[in-house]
Amino acid sequence: MGDLGVAVVIEDDDDVRNLLDAVLQQAGFEVHSAGTGRDGVDVARQRQANVITLDVGLPDIDGFEVLRRIRQFSDAYVVMLTGRNDELDTISALQGGADDYIVKPFRPRELRARISAMMRRPRVASGEVAASSSAAESGSAGSSASRRGSVLLHNGLALDTETRTVALRGTPLGLTRSEFDLLHELLKGTGAVRTRADLVRVVRGEYYRDDTYISEADERAVEVHIGNLRRKLREDPQDPRWLVTVRGVGYRLAPKRAE
């Protein structure tokens, strides 16, 4: 196995597949590839992939269906590749459980940077929520983004920065890397407004520096992640407990509530 684990490339174009193989091997992965969606699902399962690059336009089943099947057995990091600069593709990929997306043609350096940023924020399976999170949450109702050790607490929500787990009144929530990072950023902000551009940089990590151009597609991706978060939190948009939209600007943490 490579130093970084196993990467699976699901891509029907031979030239692109060979390029992805080379880039990921140079990065330190053991790489396996497939030219169809069904073969890709099988390879991802058999090889227990850590990272998957997944083309949207495959000859048998499209990348969104492949992603749906992979998410039934794997929490590997998934980067979707699309040949169209289409907002709908981006939204569908992120809502389906992808961690990132890149429009072709892509720069190998960009792909490596994005995967590196993902790998620095390791996942913890949703069923592995630390006991410390649940214990702290149970006695912290009504706290205003207070901290107990590594756990941030707010209105019944407990986020553990060490184990990268989240629990809502003791019930674990399965969040993607990006969802976790955005929630963490808002919780530690204690009510300060974070612009969409700020949150794009949180999601993109070190690849997006202060002077990097932030596109509308980048900001739309943040909106999709926030929407996914609200759905998992079962947030009432008319009476939010955690995530408040500041129109035309961004988002902030909702005020403390008495429980």
Image: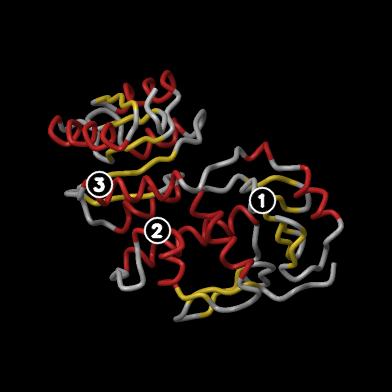
Q: Position of residue 251 (x, y in %)?
A: 54, 73
Q: Which mark is on residue 166?
A: 1
Q: Position of residue 13 (x, y in %)?
A: 16, 33
Q: Amino acid at mark 3?
A: Thr
Quadrant in which residue 54 is drawn: top left
Give the spatial CA distance, label 3 vs label 1.
31 Å
Q: Amino acid at mark 2?
A: Arg
Is the Cβ of the residue at disc 2 closer than 8 Å to that at disc 1? no
Residue at x 44%, y 59% (from the top left corner): 203
Disc 3 element: strand
Quadrant housing the C terminus: bottom right
Mark found first going from the N terminus, 3 or 1: 3
Give the spatial CA distance, label 3 vs label 2.
18 Å
Disc 1 element: strand
Q: Position of residue 216 (x, y in %)?
A: 32, 69
Disc 2 element: helix
The residue closer to the viewer here, 227 or 19, is 19
Mark found first going from the N terminus, 2 or 1: 1
Quadrant in which residue 157 is drawn: bottom right
Q: Amino acid at mark 1?
A: Val
Q: Residues within 10 Å of mark 1 (few under 14, many from 20)?
A: many
* Callout in the foreground (2, 1): 2
Reading the image, the residue beneath label 2 is: 204
Q: Residue furthest left?
A: 15
Reading the image, the residue beneath label 3 is: 82
* Callout in the foreground (3, 1): 1
Q: Position of residue 185 (x, y in %)?
A: 56, 65
Residue at x 51%, y 28% (from the top left corner): 73
Residue at x 74%, y 46% (from the top left corner): 171
Q: Is residue 47 above or below residue 246?
A: above
